[in-house]
Image (cartoon, rainbow, N blue to C red):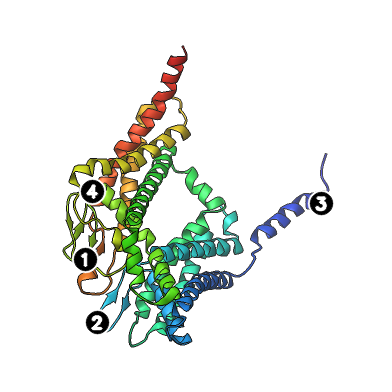
Amino acid sequence: MATTPYEDASVALPRQRSTAKDRRRGAPLAVAAAVAAGWAALTSYGLILGLAAVGAIGSGGTPAGVTRLGLAVWLLGHGVALDTPTDRISLIPLTLTAFAAWRVARAGVHASRAVGGHRQRGPGRAFGAAAAVAGVYGLLGAGAAALAGTAEISASPWRAAVLTGLFALVAATVGALGTGRPVQTILSRVPAAVRAGVRTGVVAAALIVAAGALAAGVTLAVNGGDAAGMLASYRTGVLGQAGITVLCLAYAPNLAVWGATYLLGPGFAVGVDTIVSPGDVLIGPLPALPPLAGLPSTPVAQFAPALLAAPVLAAMAAGWLLARRSGRPAGVSPWARLAGTAALAGPVAGLLVHLAGVVSSGGLGSGRLAVLGPSGWTAGLVTAVVVSAGVMLGASAARALPVRAVARRR
């Protein structure tokens, strides 16, 4: 039966409406990126400004000085080194970095949704939103460097623009691509074994750093009396001591990474020509900072294997989770699959631990404390070997235990 022109039009009308709906955008990209990036920068800076204002109570600091100090610390949290007339401060407070990265990732999510990037199969529109957020964020970083500059402390606006822009590009891309259809499209093209290996490596690296945080916390608790004495020696009053405590908490993730490298064996430095590791401790006079009260004063070479057991157990836990989560694909040997996943998880975890060591390192001045934190690829290489072996052991145990349980029932 032939259709009339009216019936053809009625059939085509919903398709036209659907196309118009797909093309409709919530806001222009420039507006969405400016609002999202500006709000992310304002919230992270507002936190720092509030802490700086509390620490400045009773110290005679002016509102302008506190504002500039907050901008300088905000830039340092993004990896922008601060210059003084004689020194350079480059040790990044990773707690502030993590908070700023979270806010910028959310900015990427909002900008991508505003332009409909979460509904697209391809990542082009989402990545464009992240790039726009990064561009605005870089301009804000340059402006912050220009406003924060004083005779006592300063930062290069060009360096600030580049580093804050790159920081925002990475964080906003993760946020923009991490929600909606683009990430599903990308992950669907990645083999399941690769996804499992990367996921296991990430989990293993996180567990190793968590073990480092536990080790650092235990040693600081054991030497809590010395840490409290150092804090009381500043005689800055309750608010001043609270400010010093907040400063120490800002560097808590740095200490966690340093603790992880200590457990792995290579250790870390607390000054030029120094080393703190299970087999060798060479340190000199240190500033009276409470977190440094937990540093070991002697080597513990006889207990080094026991310390290495912590990263091995973390890797085994990641392998256990891998075996419990993965299935048994037809035509593929479970043991061959586990071996391949473990071989991939090791390098992934090693790379992540190495990157964590890089961002947790820096300097407080150009003198003796110009070198702080782990250096080199040693910790990453040790992590790769330990995680590959530990993941295989943990996954093998998880595979073997159900069989033994069935045998015992029989």
Q: Which residue is mark 3?
A: 5
Q: Residue at x 50, y 75 (%)?
A: 50
Around disc 4, counting alpha carbons within 10 Å, would you say few (fewer than 14), some (14 to 19), or many (20 or more)?
many
Contact between marks 4 and 3 (CB within 8 A): the answer is no
**Camera-side residue: 121 or 142?**
142
Please name the amino acid that badge 1 sits on. Answer: Gly
Q: Quadrant of the N terminus?
A: top right
6 vs 154, left or right, is right
**Residue depth check, mark 1 versus mark 3: number of the one nearer the observer:** 1
**Camera-side residue: 221 or 86?**
221
Mark number for residue 86?
Answer: 2
Q: Residue at x 23, y 40 (%)?
A: 305
Q: How far across and how far down the image is residue 396, in percent?
A: 36, 29
Question: Label 2's element?
Answer: loop
Q: How far across and how far down the image is residue 120, in percent?
A: 57, 54
Q: Which residue is mark 4?
A: 265
Whether residue 87 can be seen here: yes
68 vs 24, left or right, is left
Question: Label 1's element?
Answer: loop
Q: In the rendered structure, which disc, 4 or 1, sits on the residue that comes first in sequence?
A: 4
